[in-house]
Amino acid sequence: MKRITPLLTLLTGAGTAAVLFAMSAQAAPRTVQPTAATPSASATAPPDAPSTPPVDPTGQPPAQPSEQRGRPGAPSTAPAAPVTGNWTGRLDSGATIAVTATKGTAVAYVCDGRRLEIWLRGTAADGRLKLTGKKGATLTATIGDGDVTGELVVGDKRWRFTAKAGATPAPVLYRATAQARRAGVDGGWIMLPDGSQIGVLTRDGSPAPAPPLDPAFGTTIVDGSTVTAEPVAADPGTAE
């Protein structure tokens, strides 16, 4: 019995120590293990993919900006087609008209063979004539099927006319040269398809029927003096 007592004492002490250790472990604060920071959605999200243009239902690829807007500096319309030709005809007033156009520039001459004469100058392009003269005179016409049809306006007066194209490239309109005009003699001559001619000669400001002009030499005689004329080729001086 004496041998067992110390053993029991030893066991009792060991059990008490174990109980005290367990209670001490439960009372001590727990240590939290550090965890890796969770990356934010903005940091982990992949970059936005480039936007995809809408698909054309026809299957055609979308037009590029340069195709949509047109090439910079490209003309929006084609340039006007210049016109070259000669026409003669009559106004509904009975006066005679001749029109000559050279590479888009046109000259018209209207006369009655006595006193009336009007010179006009302008453009002939895209099948249209647009001419102007002194005292606000205007001529507009349409070119088609070998004819020129239009209207002459002078002040409050209007005349319709139709002129036909010449059968040959021979000039249909002559005018006194610049030298003759500087000397005080001006004149215009219209060569008609039947070989006749009509015109007005103005000398020192007085108009009168023009004497016959020899188209082979471009000359006529006025009071014994030779006056020279030349074909009108839509030059800048012909509508003065």
Image (cartoon, rainbow, N blue to C red):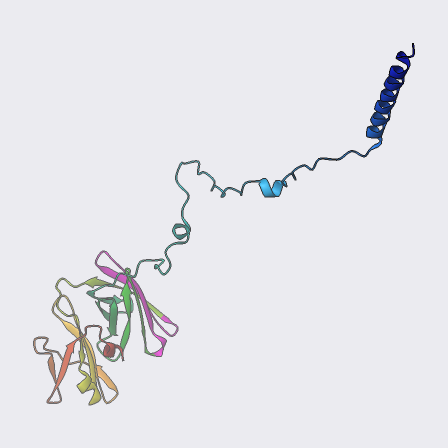
Is residue 138 part of the magenta span, yes or no?
yes
Q: What stretch is highlighted in magenta?
A: 135-157
User: 127 or 191: nearer the eye?
Assistant: 127
Q: Is residue 95 in view? A: no
Query: On the rendered structure, is 36 left or right of 226?
Result: right
Please state the total of marks drawn on the protein image: 0
Give the quadrant of residue 220: bottom left
Q: In which quarter of the image is the C terminus?
A: bottom left
Image quarter of residue 135: bottom left
- Residue at the left extreme of this rendering: 216
Q: Is residue 195 above or below residue 64?
A: below
Residue located at (71% from left, 35% from top) = 33
Q: Residue furthest front?
A: 2
Say whether residue 50 is left or right of residue 213.
Answer: right
- Where is residue 236? Give x, y as percent: 25, 77
**Residue 162's spot in the image, x, y percent?**
26, 63
Q: Which residue lies furthest to the top in this view?
A: 1
Name the one closer to the observer, 77 or 210: 77
Q: Which image quadrant for residue 20?
A: top right
Residue at 84% of width from left, 30% of height from top?
24
66 falls in the magenta region:
no
Image quadrant occupied by the N terminus = top right
Q: Relative to 211, say whether 53 is above or below.
A: above
Q: Main secondary structure of the magenta part?
A: strand
User: Where is residue 49 shown, x and y percent of the image?
Assistant: 50, 41
Residue 186 seen in render: yes
What residue sits 10% from the left and 75% below the top? Answer: 215
Q: Position of residue 104 (x, y in %)?
A: 25, 66
